[in-house]
Amino acid sequence: MSSNVLFGTNGIRGIANLELTPEFATKVGLAIGTYFGQKRILVGYDSRTSSPLISRAVIIGLASAGCDVFDGGYAPTPSIQYAVKHFKMDGAILVTASHNPPEYNGIKVVGGDGVEIPREEEIKIENIFFGEKFTRKRWNALGSISIFPGIIDVHKDAVKKHVDVKSISKKRFKVVVDAANSVGALITPYLLRELGCDVVTLNAQLDGNFPGRLPEPKPETLGDLASTVKAIKADLGVAHDGDADRCIFVDESGKVCLGDSTGAIIIDYILQKHHDGIVVTPVSSSKMVEDVITMRGGKIVWTKVGSTTVSKVMQEVNSIISMEDNGGIFYAPHQPVRDGPMAAALMLEILAKREKTLSQLVAELPKYYIIKERINCPNELKQTVLDSVLKQTEKLNSLTLDGIKISFEDGSVLIRPSGTEEIFRVYSEAKNEERCKEMAAWGISLVEKSIQSLNSKKK
């Protein structure tokens, strides 16, 4: 958080009780309450040790500005987002740091449509915050604060309306759910049991220390899930991040599938079902996704990285299905936001209808090798490093929608600064494994040389 910017790519993020203090969170809540006016605001949070503390501080600020606050308690992000629209709330606050390590927390602002507010609206809140243009209501006009249970059941029932429950139930799938010691445990195991699945859970107790694994679901953190799926001969493994808006799958052999592959499978199924359509996806997604969309007669719309951007563009172009390479699935007939439980239910319908295993479905996709790397970089150096990389690659075929994506005849390299962490991300892909490694190494060297050059100049 800089001196005049609160929001990053995905809300406000910081280390709890150090950067994200109760005093700071109360002031943020007051700014958000001032922005909304005297409205009905829902608040929910993930299992982090600091979430009850931060959420209560935000609630105090909201009520001080005159908002009537409804405390939804521990809840997945997509459950809160669905409830906003279902219960005709004016907005919501999500206290979560999603996939970040346990010491972090965050604050996200959702509009009345259940989608996180766009950047131009965040700027309005920042102007209120830094200009201290707060609305503080008199003692007899303060907003009310009340407990608001039941939103998870409403969300669960909504998901079931969008899948073929009968077809899934007939298969009696055995599924292992890894809930990351967080709020996905409150919905996905119950949802899948109601879909007729035999469910085994891992890390299903809420614990903000994340003792089972770190909250970002990726191959290196999902070893227990993979081995359990294989050991008990399960049909599928499902892993959520800290707030359950993302879903990474493990196939029946115990192999962790990348989000590009499973996203492409879901997109292929939905486009075939609806014959064609527009798919929105960030520049970080694989060309494999584009190949699948083109094969089904659909149209791809590339965006900057960030779930809010994907949601807003989805609404603008009337997209039915969209995805992110990190396991985010956006299914518009349900809601145009990332929804982990919805993604899990869709995948089960696909397995039931296609009568194939997940590994068989992955094998049918266009084959690309993908490498995803990260390089530490302080926030204050990010723009200068990016400018240096842009200059070094200015004569190459590139897309600068978000960072820089350099395309070659046999693959591509994406280099972009993270909006939530002090890192650069380097993604490479190619149809040849050695070429993919070569391009990844080249992309990493561009970033590392730029950082080293800046550090040497400082000395």
Image (spheres, rainbow, N blue to C red):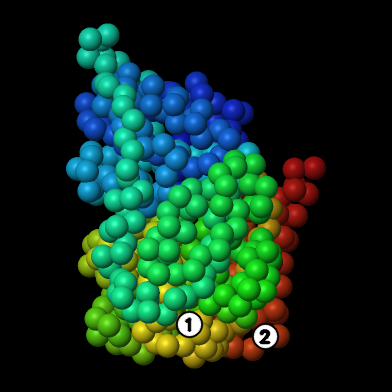
Say if 53 sits above or below 385 in the image: above
Between 324 and 4, the one lying in front of the other is 324
Which residue is labeled 1 in the image?
A: 288
Tell me if residue 206 can be seen.
Answer: yes
Q: Say which of 263 and 80 sits in front.
A: 80
Q: Quadrant of the C terminus?
A: top right
Mark earlier in primary sequence (2, 1) = 1
At x 67%, y 85%, the residue is: 433
Residue 230, position as x, y percentages in the image:
65, 76
The picture places residue 411, in percent across and down from the top left corner, at 56, 83
- Judged from the image, the secondary structure of the residue bearing numbered disc 2 is helix
Asked whether the beta carbons under mark 2 and mark 1 sit within 8 Å of each other, the answer is no
Helix, strand, or loop for circle 1? Answer: helix
* Residue type (three-letter) at the residue carrying disc 2: Glu
Expressed as whole percent of the image width and height from the top left, the position of residue 223 reads 68, 66
Q: Is residue 109 above or below residue 275?
A: above
Vertical side of 246 occupied by 49: above or below:
above
Q: Is residue 412 left or right of residue 28?
A: right
Q: Nearer the viewer, residue 76 or 421?
A: 76
Residue shown at 65%/69% (left/top)? 228
Rendering quarter of residue 125:
top left
Q: Residue furthest left?
A: 88
Q: Which residue is mark 2?
A: 433
